[in-house]
Structure formats: structure tokens, C-alpha cells
Amino acid sequence: MRAAVTGGAGFIGSHVVDALVARGDDVHVIDNFATGRRENLSDAASVHEHDIRAPLGSLLDEIRPEVVVHLAAQADVGTSVAQPLFDAEVNVVGTLNVLEAARPHGAQLIFSSTGGAIYGECERPAREEDERRPLSPYGTAKLAAEEYLATWNRLHGTSHVALRFANVYGPRQLAKLEGGVVAIFTDRLRAGEAVTIFGDGEQTRDYVYVGDVVAAVLAAMGGDGGVYNVGTGTETSVNELFDECRRIAGVEAEATHAPARPGDVLRSVLDVSRAERALAWRPQTSLAEGLALTWAA
């Protein structure tokens, strides 16, 4: 299969590229390297330096992809609050550019959306059909992009898929980006630096290991279009996460607390039963296993 991966030099993208290369696909990475790193990339992948905010038609005419895994994004909630226009340019206009460039080739789009930022506060594990109540421009932009995918499916008969990721963690994650709390904790514990938790630390998240996310991306290829949650169905507080990171690191450290950040939800956990039924996918990695793999890396 000829596959293009936008954001392919980034955290999740580079793991997707590795998996596609491993199964023998012809893999093309599209990345502007704002946060992606060339050292993440397999030598077997072709690399195209390009910003998705600019049209991609001629590039995809050259690649002629059968599938496009669209992972390039502005992924920081705080940045979206401070710079909503920039967030929309990347996450809405950028997605439209990818959609239109892929259309002449009949390529299926696998789009990385978000669970926590779209559903807002959760009283129980969120299902795909639940009301969407974004609390940040980031969540709103991802939801708008999802609706464009759904419209293209109706208008053009495509089978594009939106995967709503929970908080993804694992090797290669940058500590400075949204959702990178595991990377922040492990980096600072390793360096002996102070750890700050925003809010009281009792806010909960659904932490899913990057290897399980890659498996979900592969499972969605070639199937029907739709929206699927990708998480674990288990919520963990930030305080509990820090305790587990300390345990795995073998470090005695205490965290300090700072005021909560605008746009952060207090409770976020995803129901993944639809993906289990339709994609035959389910998470395989426990939090303890995933944190151990991350710390070892």
C-alpha cells in the first residue's frame, strides 16, 4: 500500500510510520518539522518537508496515496486558547487541504481527533454519540474537522475515519506538548527537576499507550468510515499517575501544585466498545506496562 503520513516525524506519527514500514508499505512522511524530528524516522520512508496549511495537491499527485494518516496538528490546548486563529488554520484549514488533495486519488483519510477536548466534562465513559461540549478552541477545531470528514463521506462517497484519541503517551513524546504529562513527569524525574501539577491533581484522564493507538490506526484502514474512540476506558488521576511514575523511576520526589489551566476538563475517559465491535481493536497495554516501556526508552 502507498501511505502518506502527515506529521509523520512526530510522536505518534513516527510510530505509525514504523508500523507501516514493517509491514512492507511504501511510506511517505509529510512534515514541516516544527515539532517533528528527523531522527524519529525510518530510513525506509520517503520524506517531504511541507506545511499542511499550504495546498498539498501537487505533492499528493506525486505520491498517489491509497491511504493518508493525518496526524499533523496544533495539539496544545493552551496555545489554542491564546491563538485560536492559528489553531484553526492548522486543525481546520490544514485538514481541508489534506482532504481535497487526497480526493482525486480516492485515498482514505484516517484522522487523529481528540476525545477529552471534544466531549468536555464526562459523568461516565464518553460514547461517540454523546453530546460534544468542547471547552477549548482546540476541541472545537477538531470537531469541525471531523464534520468535514463526515460531509466528504456523504458528498463524495468516501470512507474517511476519525479516531478520537484519549491521552496518548509513550516513547518519543515531547514534554512540552499537550497530553505530554507522562513525558513531563518522566523527563523531570530523570533530571532531578521539580514537578508541577496544575490544579489539585484529582482531575482524571484516560491514558492510552502509543503502540495501542498505532494498532487502532491500522485496524481502521480499509474499513467503513465513521468515528471511533481510542482509549482504555480506565481513568487515572494526575496524582495517581505521578505516584506510578515515581514508583517506576525509583525516585523519591514530591510535586508542587499550581492553579488549574483554562480549558482543562476535570474528568475525561472514553468508552471504546464501538472500536472493539467494528474494528476488532482493544487496548493491550496496561498503564504500568506502558509507563515501564516509556521509562526504559
Image (cartoon, rainbow, N blue to C red):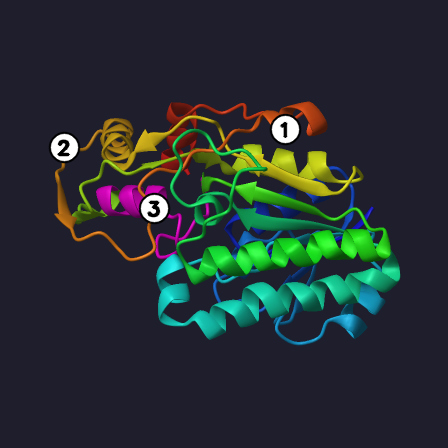
Residue at 53 percent across and 38 percent down: it is 130
Dot 3 or dot 2: first in sequence order is: 2
Residue closer to the observer: 27 or 153: 153
Q: Residue 267: x, y in percent?
A: 34, 37
Which residue is denoted by mark 3 in the rendering? Answer: 265
Residue at 34 percent across and 55 percent down: it is 263
Q: Give the structural element (helix, strand or loop) at label 2.
A: loop
Q: Residues at badges 2 and 1 in contact (C-beta under 8 Å)?
A: no
Q: Is residue 192 above or below residue 102?
A: above
Q: Which mark is residue 76?
A: none
Dot 2 or dot 1: first in sequence order is: 2
Callout 2 amino acid: Glu
Q: Quadrant of residue 272?
A: top right
Q: Is residue 143 above or below residue 21?
A: below
Q: Residue 260: x, y in percent?
A: 22, 52
Which residue is denoted by mark 1 in the rendering? Answer: 274
Give the left or right position of residue 142, taking residue 100 as reference. left
Q: Quadrant of residue 9?
A: bottom right
> Where the C terminus falls, by quadrant?
top left
Residue closer to the observer: 159 or 13: 159
Which residue is denoted by mark 2 in the rendering? Answer: 252
Residue at 68 percent across and 66 percent down: it is 96
Residue closer to the observer: 199 or 218: 199
Callout 1 amino acid: Arg
